[in-house]
Amino acid sequence: MSDTSRTLRDEVQDTAVEQLDIERVLELIPHRYPFLMIDRVVDLVRDRHATGIKNVSINEAHFQGHFPRRPVMPGVLIIEAMAQTAAVLVVRTLGKEFEGKLVYFMSVDNCRFRKPVFPGDQMRVHVIKKRRRANVWKFEAEVTVDGEAVAGATYAAMILDDT
């Protein structure tokens, strides 16, 4: 097989749209309940973008205190859903040897919360890779509920091989 056909096949694979169920998400990132903030990924193109899904449930522990009479998804957990969706994108881009590795937040900029998120909502976490330099990645994210923007941010993360 020629180098040209291998390169073309690799390019097609890198632009293929993937969907990842919860079992695959659990293989890719080390987060677990109660801190796993995405249920699946419905639209991932390696090295480009991903869309994570978070089904917000009244059974989540943080709603006991945030707030008992008017449960609202904490903003920091919405940001964490952005980070976890980006972590799945990073690991899928880098390949099997990076599965389960830790992706650490470095910065969060221009974060905006536009509307509250309530139990029963389904968050769609849209993440776009803006750039990568060595093991540092920069992302832009928007979170929507029923097609309306509820939050957004630009942030950076790094993957470390600290095993």
Image: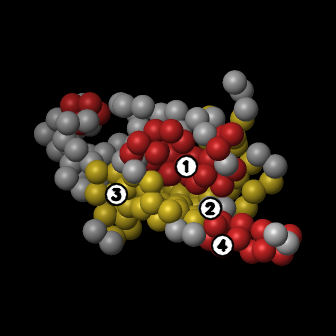
Tell me the CA gap for discs 1 and 3.
Answer: 16 Å
Q: Where is residue 43 in the image (x, y as percent from the top left)?
A: 47, 65
Which is more foreground, mark 1 or mark 4?
A: 4
Q: Tag 3: residue type?
A: Met
Q: Mark 3 points at which residue?
A: 123
- Spatial CA distance of label 2 from label 1 is 10 Å
The quarter of the picture where the N terminus appears is: bottom right
Q: Sequence-wise, which precedes: disc 4 or disc 2?
A: 4
Q: Quadrant of the C terminus?
A: top right
Q: Earlier in the sequence, mark 2 or mark 3?
A: 2
Compared with residue 142, is residue 90 higher up or lower down, i.e. above or below?
Answer: above
How far apart are labels 1 and 4 at the CA level?
A: 20 Å
Between tags 4 and 3, which lies in front?
4
Disc 2 and disc 1 in contact, CB within 8 angstroms: no
Report which residue position mark 1 lands on: 88
Q: Is residue 11 above or below residue 109?
A: below
Q: In which quarter of the image is residue 162?
A: top right
- Which mark, residue 12? 4
Residue name at image x 74 percent, y 48 percent: 136
Three-letter residue code for mark 4: Val
Q: Callout 3: helix, strand or loop? A: strand
Q: In this view, does 108 lie to the left or right of 113?
A: right
Q: Crowding at label 2, few (<14), some or many (≥20) Cα neighbours within 10 Å?
A: many
Q: Residue 124 carries which label?
A: none
Sequence-wise, which precedes: disc 1 or disc 3? 1
Sequence-wise, which precedes: disc 2 or disc 1?
Answer: 2
Reading the image, the residue beneath label 2 is 46
What type is the residue that disc 1 sits on?
Val
In contact (CB < 8 Å): disc 1 and disc 3: no
